[in-house]
């Protein structure tokens, strides 16, 4: 590689995209096209970056498989930044295998990390955990280590493992500081700020208390019976009873938990669960059926006692009942809370969980997507909705440095 290509690659490795472009902006040879593509990606011009990287891959040709594989991985990271997740993962896996076969360890690890981040964005958390486990204990370049730790922190936060998440972010901050890439360091600082924002509200008689992530995690780990209005279920220690797909049972459990240690009158339960102001015998019969179903579902953690007025929730062992609500008291807040588990939801499933029409949920999702608070993948009936990542993952694109310095 000539001196201009090498200098441009070094500039990109430190995040100096403009400095790299000054050196290769007018060149059309494949290494220069690849570097220009990376620089455009770092400047946020992702469609142009993808075009340049594809031209570079074609220019290298079949006889330069190593360089082509690096371009494929760089293009995959551009697609990740664009949130274009529709491509086949097999192409990226093949490029990673080609890099490993030719002893390009750093770029092969970069490809694996891109695959893990893609899985996180798709809500496939178990698969992402398997991929990220391969990075544990490995010596990585500082920039790559910072992004790997960001992904690890994101995965831990999705399951409210606050301690591991904070440790991963501390390691990410140290690695980003050593990497001396300002955008990457800013990404880590923003991710750490998530711990200072309200994550839920604790409701009690006459008021509410905002809770940060660490307080929510501590509450869920306590011996209290928690009615989780964010993820829609009942939790007692390690016992979790999901109710998101059973809106009537969730409405009954929520009303009983709010009234604890008192009871809830039957007509109030009917109005809350069945959304009617004129209950008749059919509603009262249905209430008995649904209470029976709820008893069977939560029997391991609590009982439901019939009283002269209605019903009362009685946790086993005389435990306290705590009600957690979304941080925003609105339908949008409930939507955001449901999506916060990192899983992909269909519109119909969200409508069922919220007890609302699909059209109402669709309108709310469109508003939230416009505000950047949710995102969608797929199209038509295959469309799914997810929360945005807690960390945005700056696209640092380390590949050109290795590409140019061979």
Image (spheres, rainbow, N blue to C red):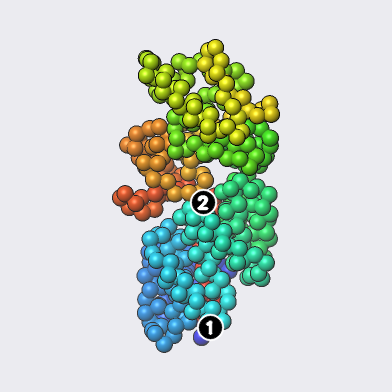
Between the C-alphas of marks 2 and 1, the distance is 33 Å
Earlier sequence position, callout 2 versus callout 1: 1
- Work out whether residue 79 or residue 242 is closer to the camera in this orientation and state it: 242
Provide the residue designation for mark 1: 102
Q: Residue furthest bottom?
A: 63
Q: Residue at x 36, y 41 (%)?
A: 348
Q: Secondary structure at mark 1?
A: loop
Which quadrant does the C terminus fall into? bottom right
Q: Position of residue 233 (x, y in %)?
A: 53, 36
Asked if residue 70 shows in the view, the reply is: no
Quarter of the image for residue 324 reads top right
Query: Which mark is on residue 287?
Result: none
- Work out whether residue 285 or residue 353 is closer to the camera in this orientation and state it: 285
Q: Secondary structure at mark 2?
A: loop
Q: Is residue 258 left or right of residue 267?
A: right
Q: Is residue 402 left or right of residue 353?
A: right
Query: Which mark is on residue 389?
Result: 2
Q: Residue at x 61, y 33 (%)?
A: 301
Which dot, 2 or 1, sits closer to the camera?
A: 1
Q: Residue at x 40, y 78 (%)?
A: 57
Q: Position of residue 169 (x, y in %)?
A: 65, 55
Q: Residue at x 54, y 50 (%)?
A: 390
Determine crowd level at label 2: few under 14, some 14-19, many 20+ residues with C-alpha closer than 10 A.
many
- Work out whether residue 285 or residue 190 is closer to the camera in this orientation and state it: 285
Q: Is residue 399 above or below residue 188?
A: below
Q: Position of residue 181 (x, y in %)?
A: 60, 64
Q: Residue furthest top?
A: 308
Determine crowd level at label 1: few under 14, some 14-19, many 20+ residues with C-alpha closer than 10 A.
few
Asked if residue 303 shows in the view, the reply is: yes
Q: Is residue 390 left or right of residue 55?
A: right
Q: Is residue 37 above or below residue 85?
A: below
């Amino acid at each position: 590689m000539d001196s201009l290509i090498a200098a441009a690659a070094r500039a990109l490795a430190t995040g100096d995209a403009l400095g790299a472009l000054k050196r290769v902006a007018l060149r059309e040879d494949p290494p220069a096209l690849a570097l220009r593509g990376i620089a455009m990606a770092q400047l946020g011009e992702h469609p142009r970056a993808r075009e340049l990287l594809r031209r570079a891959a074609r220019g290298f040709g079949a006889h330069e498989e190593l360089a082509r594989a690096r371009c494929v991985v760089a293009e995959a990271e551009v697609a990740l930044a664009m949130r274009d997740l529709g491509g086949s993962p097999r192409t990226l896996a093949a490029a990673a295998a080609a890099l490993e076969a030719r002893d390009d360890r750093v770029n092969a690890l970069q490809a694996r990390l891109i695959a893990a981040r893609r899985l996180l964005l798709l809500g496939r958390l178990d698969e992402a955990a398997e991929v990220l486990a391969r990075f544990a204990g490995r010596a990585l370049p500082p920039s790559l280590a910072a992004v790997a730790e960001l992904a690890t922190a994101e995965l831990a936060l999705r399951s409210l493992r606050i301690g591991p998440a904070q440790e991963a972010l501390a390691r990410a901050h140290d690695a980003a500081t050593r990497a001396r890439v300002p955008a990457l360091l800013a990404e880590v600082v923003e991710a750490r700020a998530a711990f200072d924002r309200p994550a839920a509200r604790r409701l009690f008689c006459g008021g509410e208390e905002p809770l940060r992530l660490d307080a929510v995690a501590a509450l869920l780990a306590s011996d209290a019976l928690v009615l989780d209005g964010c993820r829609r279920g009942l939790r007692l220690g390690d016992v979790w009873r999901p109710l998101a797909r059973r809106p009537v049972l969730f409405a009954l459990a929520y009303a009983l938990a709010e009234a604890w240690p008192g009871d809830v009158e039957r007509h109030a339960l009917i109005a809350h669960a069945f959304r009617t102001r004129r209950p008749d015998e059919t509603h009262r019969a249905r209430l008995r059926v649904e209470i029976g179903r709820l008893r069977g579902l939560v029997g391991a953690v609590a009982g439901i006692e019939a009283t002269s007025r209605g019903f009362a929730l009685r946790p086993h062992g005389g435990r306290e009942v705590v009600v957690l609500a979304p941080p925003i008291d609105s339908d949008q807040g409930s939507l955001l809370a449901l999506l916060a588990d990192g899983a992909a939801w269909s519109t119909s499933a969200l409508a069922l969980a919220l007890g609302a029409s699909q059209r109402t949920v669709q309108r709310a999702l469109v508003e939230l997507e416009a505000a950047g608070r949710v995102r969608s993948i797929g199209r038509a009936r295959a469309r799914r909705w997810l929360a945005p990542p807690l960390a945005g993952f700056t696209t640092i694109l380390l590949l050109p440095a290795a590409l140019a310095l061979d």
